[in-house]
Image (cartoon, rainbow, N blue to C red):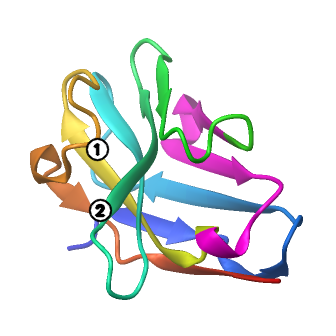
Amino acid sequence: QVELVESGGGSVQAGGSLRLSCVDSGYTSINSCMGWFRQAPGKEREGVAVIYTSGGSTFYADSVKGRFTISQDSAKNTVYLQMNSLKPEDSAMYYCARKPGTCSFWNFRTRYNSWGQGTQVTVSS
């Protein structure tokens, strides 16, 4: 059973914006770290941004700071990723992920025990 369902991917030109959504249908994501990883062809999956659902602390990869914003709507069990000023190098499959507890070591993908199926983001130059 898929607990994390992503939506919002698509194709945009460089400089454009997209908003990704991740609905957690498994359980109320209290005291967990939820966020986004991405994987481009031939590259490893990398952390993009996460949020600690019980405290609201956020963490970002250096490559997206100032352009991407992660947020949550706890009532809807949903996490969002607003992506602005998109670049061709942002093109990838974006995956929603969740791990219990805080966002310590947030970019270690092996610590996440729930993953969505991914949504494709393509940015053309």
Please tell me the numbered disc located at residue 3.
2
Residue 24, position as x, y percentages in the image: 39, 52
Q: Is residue 125 left or right of residue 100?
A: right
Which quarter of the figure has residue 25?
A: bottom left
Which quarter of the figure has residue 101?
A: top left
Residue 21, position as x, y percentages in the image: 60, 58
Residue 48, position as x, y percentages in the image: 47, 49
Please tell me the numbered disc located at residue 63.
none
Q: Is residue 108 left or right of residue 56?
A: left
Q: Amino acid at mark 2?
A: Glu
Compared to 47, does 124 lie above or below?
Answer: below
Q: Residue at x 61, y 46 (%)?
A: 64
Q: Nearer the viewer, residue 68 or 30?
A: 68
Residue under label 1: 27
Element at label 2: loop
Residue 86 in magenta?
A: yes
Q: Is residue 115 left or right of residue 69?
A: left
Q: Residue at x 83, y 56 (%)?
A: 85
Residue 36, position as x, y percentages in the image: 44, 53
In the rendered structure, which segment of residues is drawn in magenta? 69-89
Q: Residue at x 19, y 44 (%)?
A: 108
Q: Amino acid at mark 1?
A: Tyr
